[in-house]
Amino acid sequence: MRLSSSPNGERGVTPVVGVALLLAITVLLAGVVAVYAVDVSDQHLAEPAPMAAFTTETGTCAGTEVTVVHRAGETVPADELSLQSADKALTGSWAKPNGYETHGVGDGEVRSGDRATVCVDDSSTVDLEVVWHADGSDRSAVLYETTA
């Protein structure tokens, strides 16, 4: 005895539709995985901000001398670090400072013990930030903040 799905003995289209749907789902899933993989790899290619610890020391100058000292952590290229303040005009990188002085960065690297010094009026306080700027990118990160 022979069983058939139609009176004429022809097979139905249901298996063909099922295979087509499975192929479509597989292609869609592969596309989603590829987009996710590319997005994740782009995020990992971006240079992370350096891990560095800074402290503040005070002294005397024509006012109050505020010194930010690199205490520990990664060595950072001097041209990627800057000392910034909303209270005082400070520009340039630790490699070429303007409005402040740097010490120990003659080799182009900021490492433990290197420092940046600014002189402020005795009557005012100053908010300072050590900011890292990624080389060749618009990415930046504040590595240290202090008020002196």
Image (spheres, rainbow, N blue to C red):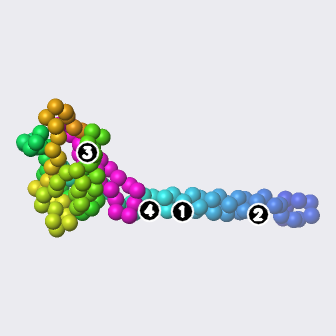
- Crowd band around label 4 with a 10 angstrom C-alpha radius: few (<14), some (14–19), many (20+): few
Asked whether residue 27 is drawn in magenta, I would say no
Q: What count of labels does the image hold?
A: 4
Nearer to me, 125 or 40? 125
Q: Which of marks 1 and 3 is in front?
A: 3
Residue 129, numbered label: 3
Q: Which amino acid does label 3 sit on?
A: Glu
**Residue located farthest toward the right when viewing the structure as drawn:** 8
Residue named by callout 1: 34
Q: Nearer the viewer, mark 2 or mark 4?
A: 4
User: The magenta stretch spans which residues?
Assistant: 128-148
Mark nearer the N terminus (2 vs 1): 2
Secondary element at tag 3:
strand
Q: Can residue 85 be seen in this view?
A: yes
- Would residue 15 appear left or right of 10 to someone viewing this image? left
Q: Who's the residue at 45% across and 61% down the image? A: 42
Q: How far apart are marks 2 and 4 (CA)?
A: 38 Å
Asked if marks 2 and 4 touch (Cβ < 8 Å), the reply is no
Q: Nearer the viewer, mark 2 or mark 1?
A: 1
Asked if marks 4 and 1 touch (Cβ < 8 Å), the reply is no
Specify the quadrant of the image occupied by residue 61.
top left
Residue named by callout 4: 41
Residue named by callout 2: 16
Image quarter (top left, top right, bottom left or bottom right) of the C terminus:
top left
Q: Who's the residue at 28% across and 56% down the image? A: 92
Mark nearer the N terminus (2 vs 4): 2
Q: How far apart are marks 4 and 1 (CA)?
A: 11 Å
Q: Distance between the residues labelled 2 and 1?
A: 27 Å
Residue 52: x and y in percent read: 21, 53
- Crowd band around label 3 with a 10 angstrom C-alpha radius: few (<14), some (14–19), many (20+): some
